[in-house]
Structures are given as structure tokens and as C-alpha cells.
Amino acid sequence: MDCFAALAITGLDLCIACPGKTLSEPGLLMRQGASGLRICLHNAAMPRSSQILAHAAGALPAPGEWQSARPVPLLANLQRLTAPNPGFMTGPGTNSYLVGDAATGYFVIDPGPADGEHIARLWDAARHADGSGGHIQAIVCTHSHADHSPGAAPLQALCTQRSGHSPPIWGLPSAPTARANSHFVPDQVLAHGALLQLQAEGAPQHTLMALHTPGHAANHVCLLLTQDGMLFSGDHILNGSTTVIDPPDGNMAHYLDSLDLLHAACVQHSVEFILPAHGHPMPDALGAIAHLKAHRLKREAKIAAVMQANPAGDPDQWLPLAYDDVDARLWPVAKRSLLAHVERIQLLAQSQAGLP
Ligand SMILES: [Zn+2]
């Protein structure tokens, strides 16, 4: 029996799989956002899924429940530190993830915006065995957008200044289609399929596999933590909001192809959880990807029907009809995704008509 099952049955605040440990122990546990269920993760021998601490409940937690002041332990080798940049486009803020432990050092995934306090907290969270910070082996950016990559260079500079060690910045360079505030040049190019490893005693302990997933951004990569069956999805898959596809750097055909690629990778590596850059972890990785693809195709069918009914119309005329179920305040953002769908619909129509 895992901890989650034990709690569901007993309703106790005591984890019966880990005698002597109470669930209110600070730093070990976190209350689940919507349902209030608590899950224990400190028994590393438990099945992988039961190690998840901040379990996804679908709905985002109430305002104030998210905090950026402290790292939240999710697994023995995984911490989440949310940047203090909550907002319309970023939800509770950008999740920076630290993968690793005191023996191996850490990967920092998505250091977020160039926020001095957040960067100092990332430094502190990457602890050596003696408790001192800065044990950062590499910084990895899922993509170049302003809420993800600008913190990379200042974090690297802080490491250099305090320890003399300069962890490399990994990622894909921004494409020429990227907006001016999303220009990004990594130190090391993270090719599709590349493996980043943290080692201890000569053996790899934590391995990130890079998966090139264009769609939200042309230089977007997801990262698969192979030993634990976790997928860091960046902004390709979010919890609590829908990814915006903003052409030309965003591309709907690429986005859907990347979803298929992620589905295949999750099957191959038995991935259970998706860890998005915004929002809670998501259980049932395969179900979440299938749901997302169906949601996109449903929207696309609606847009195609609106276009068919008014072929002489333009996107501004199609938008209120195709997104009549969405709050009008979101329409300016929805219009970007509508344009991406229109691009794909026209491409599919051309190929069906046998045109080049
Ligand atoms: Zn983002």
C-alpha cells in the first residue's frame, strides 16, 4: 500500500507507510490545492507515483496558497521554486525546477525572469551536503520566452562570482521568427535526444532527455527525467490554462506533431506525471496529452466551420464566433491561436487539393 492509499483509507494525518512521520512535518509535505488530501513522499522506496507531493487536482489553488519564498520538495531529487511573477499569462508564476541531490549537484530548469531574489533562492536551494548553496551543474531553458530564460545569465553570473564555477546554459537558440524580447543564445545546444546526466560515484543518477517540441515556440524543448518517469513540459503543456500559439514562431501543425512525439515518449519511458512551467503537476500524462490534442482539434473544427460559413470574412470576424465560449477579455490572446489554426486549416486544405 502506498501512502496515498493509506491516507485515503485511514484519513489520518499520519503516514502509515512511514511510521513516526507526521504529514505536517514542515518542508516534507504540502497540502493539496483543491481537495486537501495530503501525500507523503519521504519514503523513496514507494512506487514512483506515490512520491509526488504536490498532487494535481485539476483546479489551481486559491490565491495566496502559492508561494515563491521557499522551494517545494516534490520528490527526493526534485524541487519546485516558483518565480514571483504571477499574472494573466503566467498563472501562479513560472515554475523553476531543481533536479538532483547534494551528492550529484543540480540541474536548474527554467530559471525564469531575471529576478534577483528568485535567482538567489535558486542558488540557496541547490545545496551541497554541508548545507551551502550553489551546487548547480547546469542551467536548462525549455524555451526563450521572457518568463523562462532571462534568469539564466544572472544565475550563471552569481555562480561564477560566488564559487568560481560557471554552469553552462543549455537550450536551443531562438529562431529568426522569435519576437525581440525572446532572443536567446545558449552556451550549449540541446539537440533532440541529447542526454544530460548528473553523476555520483561514477554512475549516472539523474538523466534528462531533451525532446525538441516546436509549436509554442520554435526553440521549445521538453525534458524527460528518465529514472523517475517525469516530463518537464515547459509551456507546451500547462495546468490551468491553454498554451498560446503565436505565429510565426508558434506553429499549430508543429504543436500537434510535438504532442504526438510527447505521447510516444511518455509511452516508451512509462511517464506518469507532467510537470508544467505554470501550475501543479499533472497525473495521468497520457490522458492529459490525449485530452489536450482532442481539445485543440475540437477548436480547430469549430474555426473551420466558422470559416466555411463566411469564407470572405477575416480573422476579426471569425474570432467572436469561434471563441464564443471564451471570455471576451481573452480574445486578443485567443486571436493569436486562431491565426495559428487558420494557418493549419489552409495548409491542410491545400494539401488535400493537391496544391504545392
Ligand atoms: Zn511560460
Image (cartoon, rainbow, N blue to C red):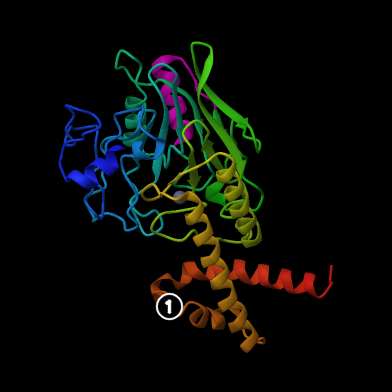
In the drawing, does residue 77 fall left or right of residue 245?
left
Q: Can residue 163 be seen in this view?
A: yes
Q: Can residue 149 be seen in this view?
A: no
- Crowding at label 1, few (<14), some or many (≥20) Cα neighbours within 10 Å? few
Residue segment shown in magenta: 151-168
Depicted 205 relative to depicted 326: above or below: above
Q: Establish whether ligand 1 lies closer than 8 Å to the Cβ of label 1.
A: no
In the drawing, does residue 202 fall left or right of residue 118?
right
> Percent position (x, y) of residue 243?
49, 58
> Percent position (x, y) of residue 47?
39, 35
Depicted 298 relative to depicted 109: above or below: below
Q: Looking at the image, which residue sits at the far top?
A: 201
- Please name the residue that numbered disc 1 is placed on: 325
The residue located at (36%, 55%) in the rendering is 91
Depicted 126 relative to depicted 311: above or below: above
The N terminus appears in which quarter of the rendering? top left
Q: Is residue 163 magenta?
A: yes
In the drawing, does residue 231 fall left or right of residue 264?
left
Between 216 and 25, the one lying in front of the other is: 25
Q: Does the magenta stretch include residue 158?
A: yes
Q: Is mark 1 on a helix, strand or loop?
A: loop
Indicate the quadrant where residue 208 lies.
Answer: top right
Depicted 287 relative to depicted 347: above or below: above
Between 48 and 329, the one lying in front of the other is: 48
> Percent position (x, y) of residue 32?
26, 48
Between 327 and 152, the one lying in front of the other is: 327
Main SS, magenta region, reads: helix
Indicate the quadrant where residue 53 lies.
Answer: top left
